[in-house]
Amino acid sequence: MDAIVLMALIATLGTWLVTALGAATVVFFKSPNPRALNLMLGFASGVMIAASFWSLLQPAIARAEAASKLPAYVVATAGFLFGAIFMWGSDKVVTLTQRKVSNTGEGEATRVGRVMMLILSITLHNIPEGLAVGVAFGVLQKSGVTTEGLMGAVTIAIGIGLQNFPEGAAVSVPLRREGYSRKKSFFCGQASGMVEPIAGVIGALLVVYVEAILPWALAFAAGAMILVAVHELIPECQKNNEAQPYFATMGIVLGFAVMMLLDVMLG
């Protein structure tokens, strides 16, 4: 296996592990500390927003200017929008299915259906996140493995891993509340992250072996990450935040600042 693809696999196995750690909170706690989750979600969203520009969009524009027949602004904009639309479409499918399930009544089948929709929703979110990590590592094949490039790819993986922790808990804790055993709740929670290593390898392979797709893939990953951060993470981290309204917000600012510092300092 190509060394770059192997690195992408290891990185996404790491993000899957963080998902499993989040799911494991159901074993020790009835529910995670909401303040800690808010801070973590805010920090992860700040990291993802900063990474979307410095580690994904900026390289996408540079690559498109160097190699694409289309103007760089067309490639970056179209790829970015396609990534966001892909995530929006995934959410739309899940929402429509949830509505059909909710209209069938309140029996056991409905309860199971809602649980499955919860798992599916988180799983769909993990696909472009895995692709983003894979693409970030795939870029190293074209630009060369440097300390700066490797740190950028690792930082993206860390940012996505951080936001996977509450996602794992977001699956396992509701399952536990529905009456599932701790073991089964944990298994379903960590299973939602299993698609990330698969998507990560696919993303890396596409970039490594299909060079023309590189700027498109980078912009696609940026669009998907921005939509997840703005639509999912930021609203979620602001919930139950009345006592300290700036707690999660400062997490966003800190996450953005840390990612910006790393990218600018090392890039």
Image: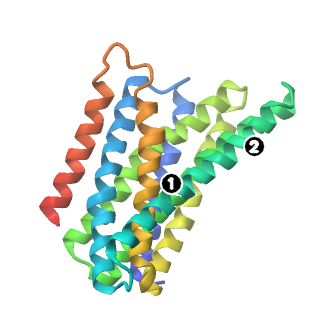
Residue type highlighted by circle 2: Thr
Q: Position of residue 33 (x, y in %)?
A: 43, 24
Q: Could you tell me which secondary element the residue under label 1 belongs to?
A: helix
**Viewer-closest of 64 and 147:** 64
What SS does tag 2 mark? helix
Residue 210, image x, y percentages: 47, 85
Query: In the rendered view, does 191 fall on the left or right side of 11?
Result: right
Q: CA distance from mark 2 to mark 1?
A: 26 Å
Residue 187: tell me if it is visible: no
Tell whether 246 sits left or right of 6: left
Q: Which mark is residue 84?
A: none
**What residue is rendered at 25% in x and 71% in y?**
149
Circle 2/circle 1 CB separation < 8 Å: no
Quadrant of the image containing the C terminus: bottom left
Q: Quadrant of residue 255?
A: top left
- Disc 1 designates what residue? 16
Residue type at mark 1?
Trp
Estimate how packed mark 2 is, as few (under 14), some (14 to 19) or many (20 or more) residues with alpha carbons within 10 Å: some
In depth, the one of 243 and 176 nearer the eye is: 243
Rendered location of residue 59, percent (x, y): 29, 71
Q: In the image, residue 217 lies at what x, y percent?
A: 44, 71
In this view, the residue farthest toward the left is 265
- The front one of 191 and 78 is 78
The residue at which mark 2 appears reads as 97
* Disc number lying in front (2 or 1): 2
